[in-house]
Image: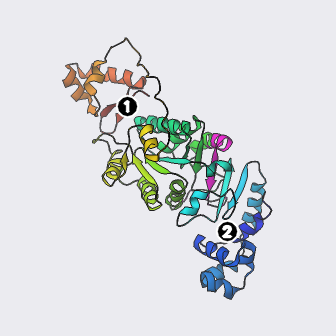
Amino acid sequence: MRPDAFEWLRLCLVPGLSGTAQRALLKAFGTPSAATEAAHSSVAAVAGTAAANALEVPPAEELLSATLTWLDGPGHHLLALGDDDYPRALLEIADPPTVLYALGDTGMLNRPAMALVGSRNATRQGVLDAQEFARALSGSGYAIASGLALGIDSAAHRGGLAGPSSTIAIVGTGLDRVYPAANLDLAGEIAARGVIVSEFPLGTPPVAANFPRRNRIISGLSRGVLVVEAALKSGSLTTARLALEQGREVFAIPGSIHSPFSKGCHWLIKQGAKLVESAEDVLGELGAPIPPPAEPRTCPGEPGAVDPVLEALGHSPASLDALSLRTGTPASQIAADLTQLELAGRVERLPGGLYRQLAVP
């Protein structure tokens, strides 16, 4: 544990003391201990009366003690502004966190990173795309940054772990809890082979307002943000907006005009986000080396064989009745064929009774 952990926590765990006030005090007084020991009038002159009043009340002893105990654990870190291992990319954003709690390999926070974000209620194709893009970008030297949510975030982390550059999870809770609980095993793997970070103190529950706030760190750590799937009202669009404000690149994967999960991506593309169809498109925009193409994969089945249902389905969602009309096959048989194709990972069921063909990874 760092020797000045108590001093940093004594400043940053003060209830009601904003990050803006913390940074102003550090700029004026130089060290966290000097800031917390400064006279009320001096603090008020620098950061306002509210900040001076807040510093009159020390952090909860129980939280302070619990955090110091946590920092004694293996792989547990407290990174503060001015540290050599504090993420340099975050120094470029308007509101860098004064401290970051980290679990895992903090060296990753100063390596090139790419953010992948998207819908929690992702389609199967979206999950496959996120994982494949993340794996390819990780293989090209970019750690994959995302928010440990279900859906696209989880797929992005798994893809990052499948490549050599691993993954960074930026969470909206304290690091003594995992949210959502379904990602407990994934979080453990990231802590062992990547890094999890949070600006929120231990014990912080999954408060809704914290997740949009952490998005500035996801984009801030990264060279760019790739939105894989997003509805029009999506936190992923907030991350993309923050990325633009921070001078980062924004990319979006297009989808079907019929899918609500493509609406957000299409809106971003209309606003100037770069349309990408492959990881090579992203790497090219970033000016990164593009790896040689992988060997083409063949689909199972007889060479040249084409499934008539897949051929009728094409690349746009269709209903069972529409497929029955296109193929001249009874709906009952089409339903059975679709079930088999769904089990084989060739199609997925969408809301509204529609089916969509999945690209073979």
| Image point (57%, 42%), residue name | 182
Circles 1 and 2, Cβ within 8 Å, touching? The answer is: no
* Residue 254 forms part of the magenta stretch: no
Image coordinates of residue 178 in percent, x first then y, are: 61, 49
Q: Answer whether residue 57 is visible to the viewer in this image.
A: no
Depth check, mark 1 against mark 2: the one in front is 2
Of marks 1 and 2, which one's residue comes earlier in the chain? 2
Image coordinates of residue 358 in percent, x first then y, are: 37, 30
Q: Residues within 10 Å of mark 2 (few under 14, many from 20)?
A: many
Q: Is residue 242 above or below residue 112?
A: below
Q: Is residue 52 left or right of residue 253?
A: right
Q: Which residue is mark 2?
A: 12
Image coordinates of residue 205 in percent, x first then y, are: 60, 58
Depth check, front residue: 258 or 87: 87
Which amino acid type is marked by label 2?
Cys
| Image point (67%, 88%), residue name | 41
| Image point (33%, 40%), residue name | 255
All told, the count of numbered labels is 2
Numbered circle sitting on residue 246: none
Where disc 1 sits, the SS reads: strand
Q: Is residue 333 above or below residue 31?
A: above
Which residues make up the magenta segment?
187-207
Q: Which residue is mark 1?
A: 348
Which amino acid type is marked by label 1?
Glu
Q: Is residue 274 above or below residue 30?
A: above
* Residue 189 forms part of the magenta stretch: yes
Q: Quadrant of residue 70?
A: bottom right
